[in-house]
Image (spheres, grey):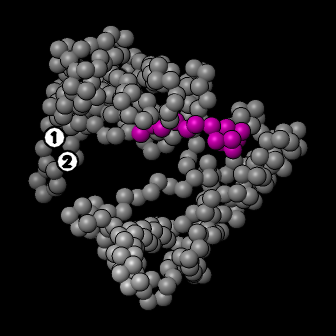
């Protein structure tokens, strides 16, 4: 397989794997008004919603502790599925109405010769968020509509708005066992569909919101927490530290980093750009000339994308250079005094 060589004196030439918005272009078709609007929101970088499922307690005590956490130890009121607001003194009684101790599956025993069954989650914890400066009351209104649309009449739920962090967000707790005994299973495609629904509900609140994958927006994936650059007692991962050591050795030996995975990124980028250009051609044919130009501009200026190994190498070089700069700055007064003494 062809290998790509990356010289770390440059800022990276690989480009981003992006999601194709132009699949109908392969068929010579047309975009619907909804698709045109979606393309415009993505290309023009409308704020993107965040929706993530953060697990859920397997014990009643864990669920109670999560209620205490999201209410900030009772400083915030929790809104229930029927619209009531409960204070800290009411949380225990409210949670008792969910009868979590009766949820099936949590008392299963292991069969002879088989591993113990996985613990059953009693609730599902969901976070709904928007970037600042989105009005928090709009985020909460959209989250309330989302919960009502997805779970009303089927699952009990409770929610609370947090505004003490940079992004206004809502914590939503949903009882896993439904009112009719059917358990809530969150399959892999569901969060993506939920994000799109949450964005739609925000737009109904007159908030510009979009829901697309990170690579569809021409964005790199989130930076990892490179614990290997910190003092050993602060290392987040010994595995990362070992990778950093391997990269440092390779740089010392060759001055470059070779990663076979880079070739795949190059092929993906070429296909993605071709898809964008076909998208622009279809938009041109539909009379969306301005948007077609925006799509071409977007495709021609995609930011560089790197493999995990290449990202780690660049972060390592930046860290090394920052330490050298700090050391030079610390030595400068001593050097100046020495030169003055010599003169």
Q: Report the quarter where the C terminus lies.
A: bottom left
Report the residue that reaches farthest toward the left. 112
Stretch in magenta: 39-52
Q: CA distance from mark 1 to mark 2?
A: 7 Å
Residue 119 percent location from the top left of the image: 21, 43
Height in image: 25 above or below 72? below
Answer yes or no: is residue 245 visible.
yes
Figure quadrant of the N terminus: bottom right
Please state which of residues 23 and 5 is positioned toward the viewer in this rendering.
5
**Mark 2 neighbour class, 10 Å CA radius: few under 14, some 14 to 19, many 20 or more:** few
* Mark found first going from the N terminus, 1 or 2: 1
Point out residue 129 in the picture as x, y percentages from the top left corner: 45, 33
Q: Identify the residue shown where x is 26% and y is 66%.
A: 231
The residue positioned 34% from the left and 40% from the top of the image is 54
Please give the residue where the numbered disc 2 appears in the rendered image. Answer: 117
User: Is 149 displayed left or right of 234 in the figure?
Assistant: right
In the image shown, does 108 or 223 lie closer to the viewer?
A: 223
Magenta segment includes 139: no
Residues at circles 1 and 2 in contact by the CB criterion of under 8 Å: yes
Q: Which mark is residue 41?
A: none
Which secondary structure lies at badge 1?
Answer: loop
Instruction: State the residue position of label 1.
Output: 108
Q: Is residue 95 left or right of residue 145?
A: left
Residue 252, quarter of the rendered image: bottom left
Residue shown at 36%/76% (left/top)? 337
Q: Position of residue 332 (x, y in %)?
A: 39, 73
């Amino acid at each position: 397989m062809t290998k790509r060589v990356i010289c770390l004196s440059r800022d990276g030439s690989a480009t981003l794997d992006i999601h194709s918005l132009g699949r109908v272009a392969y068929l010579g078709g047309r975009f619907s008004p909804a698709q045109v609007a979606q393309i415009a929101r993505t290309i023009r970088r409308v704020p993107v919603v965040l929706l993530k499922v953060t697990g859920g307690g397997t014990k009643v005590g864990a669920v109670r502790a999560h209620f205490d956490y999201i209410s900030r130890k009772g400083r915030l009121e929790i809104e229930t599925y029927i619209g009531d607001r409960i204070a800290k003194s009411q949380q225990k009684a409210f949670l008792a109405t969910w009868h979590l101790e009766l949820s099936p599956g949590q008392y299963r025993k292991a069969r002879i010769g088989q591993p113990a069954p996985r613990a059953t989650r009693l609730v599902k914890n969901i976070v709904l968020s928007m970037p600042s400066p989105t009005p928090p009351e709009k985020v909460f209104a959209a989250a309330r509509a989302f919960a009502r649309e997805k779970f009303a009449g089927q699952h009990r739920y409770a929610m609370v708005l947090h505004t003490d962090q940079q992004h206004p967000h809502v914590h939503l707790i949903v009882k896993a066992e439904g009112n009719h005994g059917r358990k809530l299973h969150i399959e892999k495609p569901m969060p993506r569909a939920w994000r799109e629904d949450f964005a739609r509900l925000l737009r109904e609140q007159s908030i510009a919101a979009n829901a697309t994958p990170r690579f569809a927006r021409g964005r790199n994936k989130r930076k990892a927490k490179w614990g290997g650059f910190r003092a050993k007692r602060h290392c987040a991962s010994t595995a990362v530290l070992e990778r950093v050591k391997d990269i440092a050795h390779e740089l010392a030996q060759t001055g470059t980093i070779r990663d076979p995975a880079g070739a795949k990124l190059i092929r993906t980028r070429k296909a993605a750009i071709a898809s964008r250009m076909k998208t622009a051609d279809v938009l041109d044919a539909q009379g969306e000339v301005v948007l077609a130009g925006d799509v071409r501009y977007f495709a021609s200026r995609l930011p560089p994308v790197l493999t995990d190994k290449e990202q780690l190498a660049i972060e390592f070089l930046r860290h090394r250079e920052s330490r050298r700069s700090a050391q030079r700055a610390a030595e400068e007064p001593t050097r100046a005094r020495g030169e003055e003494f010599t003169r």
